[in-house]
Every structure is written in C-alpha cells, then in structure tokens.
Image (tube, coloured by chain):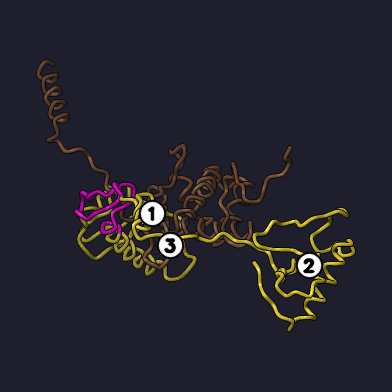
Chain colours: A yellow, B brown
Amino acid sequence: VVVLVHSPLPRLRALIQRCWGRLERGLWPGVFGDHSQPWGPALAMQGLALVPQGINDGGESSAVAPSPLESVVWMAAPKQRRTIEVNRCRRRNPNKLIEIKRNIDVCPECGNLKQKHVLCGYCYAKVKEETRLVRMEIYKKERGPFNAPTVETVVLYEGEKPTEEDEGKRIIERARKRPSWFVQN
Amino acid sequence: MRLSVAAAISHGRVYRRFGLSPRSRLDLLRNLVTALVRHERIETPWARADEMRGYAERLIDYAKRGDKDERAMRMADFWLTEKDLIHKLFKVLGPRFQPHPGSYTRLLQIPNRDGLDRAKMAVIELKGNPLPPLIRPRRDSDKTLLNQLLKGYRQDAQRAA
C-alpha cells in the first residue's frame, strides 16, 4: 500500500523512526513476545512496506508504512453473498426440518389421539377430576391436616354396600353413579 | 495417565442433580416421597418421579420389616416429614405390600405440562390404591381369529372328554 503523505506529520514520522530504531537495536523486547536478539517481522502481511532505510529521505513519495503498532487481528469473513438458492438448500435440508412423529395412535376408549407411550390426555383428565372429587370427600372426612388414617380406604358410589373384603376399611361415599371405567373389585 | 475426571463428563453417574445442592436434592425427594405416601398418587416432572421411585420402594421395603425394627423406624422418621404418615406406612402400606416381592409403584407418562416450559410430566402411584384407576386393562376381543380358534379347540376338547 503506497500512501502519499505530505509533511503535515513530521512528529509522527519522527516517532516512528525512533520506535523502529529501538526495535532494531533490540531495546524493546516486550512488543512481540520474547524473541532472541536477531528477529525479523513476525507476521507476513500483504502490502506492508517496511522501508526503514528510506525514512531519512526527504521524498514524500515513499510509503508511510503502517507501523507494527496497529492491530493485526485478521478474522474470517465471507467473500461472496450466499445466493438464495444455496440458502434454501441449507435451510430446507431434511436434517434441519422438524422430525415427523410416527408414534401417534387413537385411544381405544375415547377416540382422541395419543402418543403410544403416553396416557391419553382426555382419559387422564377424566380420572384426575374424579380423583379430585374423591380427595375432597376424604378431606371432609378427615376434618383437618395430618390425620392420615391407619386403615385402608375404599370408595363406594350410590347404592353400593361394602363387601366382605371391605371389612375394616374406611369408607368414602361419592354421591353419583359408579363410572363405567371404575370397576369395583 | 489422566487421574482426574473433567468436570463436564458424567460417565456412570446414576443420580440426577436436582435443587441447589445434594442436601437440597434429598429434601426435594423427601417431600415427594411424603406426598406419595399421603396421597398415593402424585403428578410431577418425569425426572423427579423416576428419581423418587427408587427411594419410595426402598422405604416400603423397610416398612415391610415392621415397626419394631429400629433401623426401619429411623428411616421412616427421616423420610416422612409428616409424622402421622409413619403410622400409615407401617400399618397400611407394610401389610398391603407384604405378598408383593417388589415394584410397589407405577410410573406413567402424561402429556407435557400446559405451562410455558412444556415439561415432561409423569404420574406415580402406589399399586393397590383406592383411587380411580388410570389404565383400564384391555383383554383381546373374543372375535379375533386366534381367540375363535382357541375357543373351538376348547369346545372340541370338552366334547371329547
């Protein structure tokens, strides 16, 4: 890179000359890390014309070398714009699309869709609601926290009598007809 | 030879990490075990239910030993934070699971949570609980080919006998 700079920067040139002199003589070892005495430019940079000999010239046509004091961090950058065709190929590649699920089935009880290894949402909501009502009855019977009974519990619906195996159990009454899916044992 | 394991590798570790610290993890699991013994069916994230399952089953194994056992009583005292459940554990759950050799809990996955996190949820319940059943065991219908053939075979055997 050849830059024509006129005399407005004599101080800068003088500074550069002094720094370069010190570098040359090895009196400034901290710049590029620890090198042994004879050292050359550590980086090969395009267009950086280091002309130490030409500094004492009066001519301004010589290049003002960008000093090694400038930052020399080179980062990767795309050279060309990616066309929309290339972009589409990358974005629509099957490994980037959402995987299709093949484990969806129909619940045999209610006919809603469900995943094969998961409970049906509708049937579970039904059971959850019934469990909530049973628990409300239990809470009414226990009349307070920390009163867990020391006997088993059995849930009976309208018009049902406890059988022989429900002998010593606590009975929870539910005021409705027994649902078809809750089979009495 | 590398003598230490890098921080990000967890090969062979069986316990999941929960909460703020190992002590907090145990407290969390303890709360879940207490809730399970009290309500006999709880709905929690799947990872917590899976982790808690082992502890709950071991607690029931201790309960089967009977409440005269000093070790069993100390375990129940630690794991159940609500002390009326210790009575329930030894008097109800112990006798209930005495004939079973193992696997006293049932872990089933339910649809993901409705909130923003869409967490994988599960419901864990003790077997033999009085609540309405979650799954209805289905028997094959009588009209299938195999069942009709078996029925015919049974009838022939009966007629021959």
- Residue range in magenta is A101-124
The correct choice, above or below, for B158 with respect to A31 in the image is above
**Residue B28 versus residue A141: which sits nearer the camera?**
B28
The correct choice, above or below, for A75 with respect to B159 in the image is below
The structure residue drawn at horizontal position 21% and vertical position 51%, both measured from the top left corner, is: A109
Task: Report which residue position mark 2 lands on.
Answer: A54
Count of number-bearing discs: 3
Label 1: few (<14), some (14–19) or many (≥20) C-alpha neighbours in 10 Å: few
Give the chain of mark 3: A
The type of residue carrying mark 3 is Arg
Task: Report which residue position mark 1 lands on.
Answer: A90
What element does badge 1 sit on? helix
The alpha-carbon separation of the residues under discs 3 and 2 comes to 42 Å
Q: Which mark is residue A81?
A: 3
**Residue B84, x across and y down, in percent:** 52, 61
Q: Is residue B84 visible?
A: no
Compare marks 3 and 2 and give the one earlier in the sequence.
Answer: 2
The alpha-carbon separation of the residues under discs 1 and 2 comes to 53 Å
**Residue B122 versus residue A21: which sits nearer the camera?**
A21
The structure residue drawn at horizontal position 35% and vertical position 60%, both measured from the top left corner, is: A84
Q: From the viewer's perspective, is the residue at label 3 or at label 2 nearer?
A: 2
What element does badge 3 sit on? loop
The type of residue carrying mark 1 is Arg
The type of residue carrying mark 2 is Gly
**Residue A127, x across and y down, in percent:** 29, 58
The structure residue drawn at horizontal position 54% and vertical position 49%, both measured from the top left corner, is: B55
* Residue B160 appears left or right of A148: left
